Image (cartoon, rainbow, N blue to C red):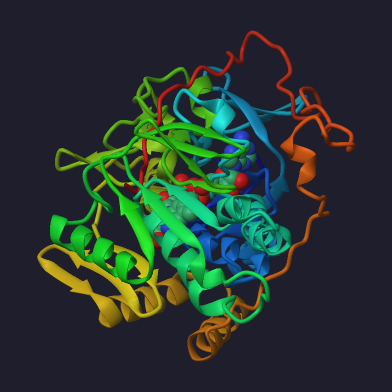
Amino acid sequence: MSDDGRDGRRRSHVVILGGGFGGLYAARALAREPVDITLLDRKNHHLFQPLLYQVATAGLNPSDIAAPIRRILRHQKNVRVELAEATAIDVENHAVRVGERAVGYDFLIVATGVTHSYFAHPDWEAHAPGLKSIEDALEIRRRVLLAFEEAEREPDEERQRAWLTFVVVGGGATGVELAGALAELAHHVLHADFRRIQPTRARILLVEGGDRLLPAFTPGLSEDAKETLAGMGVSVEVATKVEGIDADGVVLGGKRIAARTVLWAAGVRASPLATTLGAPLDGAGRVLVADDLSLPGHPEVFVVGDLAHVEHEGKLVPGVAPAAMQEGAHAAKAIARALVGGKRVPFRYFDKGSLATIGRAAAVAERDTIHMTGFVAWLAWLVIHLFFLIGFRNRVLVMLEWAWAYVAYDRGARVITQAWRPTAAVRGPASQLPPPPAPRTTGPLAPPPGPAFPPNRGEGAVDQRA
Ligand SMILES: Cc1cc2nc3c(=O)[nH]c(=O)nc-3n(C[C@H](O)[C@H](O)[C@H](O)COP(=O)(O)OP(=O)(O)OC[C@H]3O[C@@H](n4cnc5c(N)ncnc54)[C@H](O)[C@@H]3O)c2cc1C
């Protein structure tokens, strides 16, 4: 959009949607190229999602795992960061709709990721929050900490048991991490803090619809994870489908389990922005990209990260951070090559292996034929997560928090932040409290009408990390 000051040619404008792993690594890889970049994100921060479960279980604070995008890119002079939500993409006119505006581009990189999916049960969301954002993590933390408070106040034994029952739905890496961290919280951190209840009696149930936990790992490691969780006091139910979720609990195999805290780690669906690209989508709403990550028929548009359905050597590239980073960098290089008339090259995924932590000094790791469990795997997990955490300050803070948690069996972020109301409010007609406000259906982010921007139509869901 601007003159490059050397040969008088207009510099190309690259728009990047999303400042997650895909978008951020794309922006960085374009640092030395003669382009002007606009990076749009609806949040002001880049979020290190792999450690979200630590915020959800009071181990870390939000600012330990999130950093302002503007700050991360402050030294990169060819980037302008804008806090804004893209609502549609008009590939024919090379424009992104942002509120009432159309932002033009020469090249576009779409990296807006995925959201939760409750399959065909959107009503479950209110009772079983998922974990994708800082807001989600704080909501889960609030519910978990409040459950112990409610149990302490509850004189009725049966209702107390329901408050002390936690169900995690989904046995992929996120579900395993959440269940393990909840067990540690109940059995090692809170055990001395209450007088009427024994937090150690908390029941943590991990439910997986498939026939084993961590299906992305080899069966031996799945079994190892299950045994480790059992040793930590987590009950694991595999091959068990959730048939219902409401304010009082879950229904599993026709049996109701009274549980006041249910957490969702079972499925994701692509960002609805994908549907406005007019490209073919897979069952989870991800965009089926060409082998160079471009949109078929639109070599100037790239889709990267969780939002893209990318295959490498006949296999779907998993929805993990290293894949998003590699794809973002690949799209950036393709743009740099296009600027000098170079040829496109297909994307090649370099699989760095899989890691999942289960709890204190317990994890599973796998790379090709190398398998690790226990303390060694956990140490590898620790080092890798610290290394990729954005910002030196965050790395130091997280390292100190972990060291303290390890030595003292403590979790420092046990703060209930939102306003608290007695739970009688949700129990039925006896409540004297006013009903909650109706959900907002209109507002500044509601998509404006316009024929160039078709409505969203994404459907389907998968657990990308399963
Ligand atoms: C709880 C959890 C744990 C995980 N653990 C691991 C792990 O241990 N290891 C691992 O490798 N991977 C892990 N992952 C997966 C990993 O985080 C993702 O693969 C990775 O974040 C994908 O990067 P992305 O850039 O595609 O999307 P994201 O990182 O999700 O970024 C998308 C960005 O787009 C922005 N955005 C969305 N819609 C719009 C819009 N319309 N307009 C403007 N901005 C928008 C969002 O605000 C966000 O900043 C985990 C994910 C979760 C949720």
Determine whether, in the image, residue 161 is placed left or right of residue 329: right
- Residue 30: x percent and y percent? 49, 55
Q: Residue 400's x, y, as percent?
A: 57, 86
Q: What residue is drawn where x is 24% and y is 38%?
A: 311
Between 285 and 373, the residue placed more toward the observer is: 373
Count of residue discs? 0
Q: Position of residue 318 (x, y in %)?
A: 30, 47
Q: Which quadrant of the figure has residue 367?
A: bottom left
Observer able to see residue 307: yes
Q: Relative to residue 285, is residue 14 drawn left or right?
A: right
Q: What is the quadrant of the N terminus in the image? A: top right
Report the residue at 46% width, 76% height from top: 386
Judging depth in this view, the residue of 170 and 85 nearest the camera is 170
Answer left or right for 222 relative to 265: left
For the view shown, which residue lies furthest in the bottom direction? 407
Which residue sits furthest front? 156
**Observer able to see residue 303:** no
Residue 309, placed above or below residue 55: above
Where in the figure is residue 398, as x and y percent of width and height?
A: 56, 79
Q: Residue at x 23, y 74 (%)?
A: 373
Closest to the observer, 221 or 85: 221
Q: Residue furthest left?
A: 369
At x 81%, y 50%, the residue is: 422
Q: Would you place residue 242 above or below residue 223 in this image?
A: above
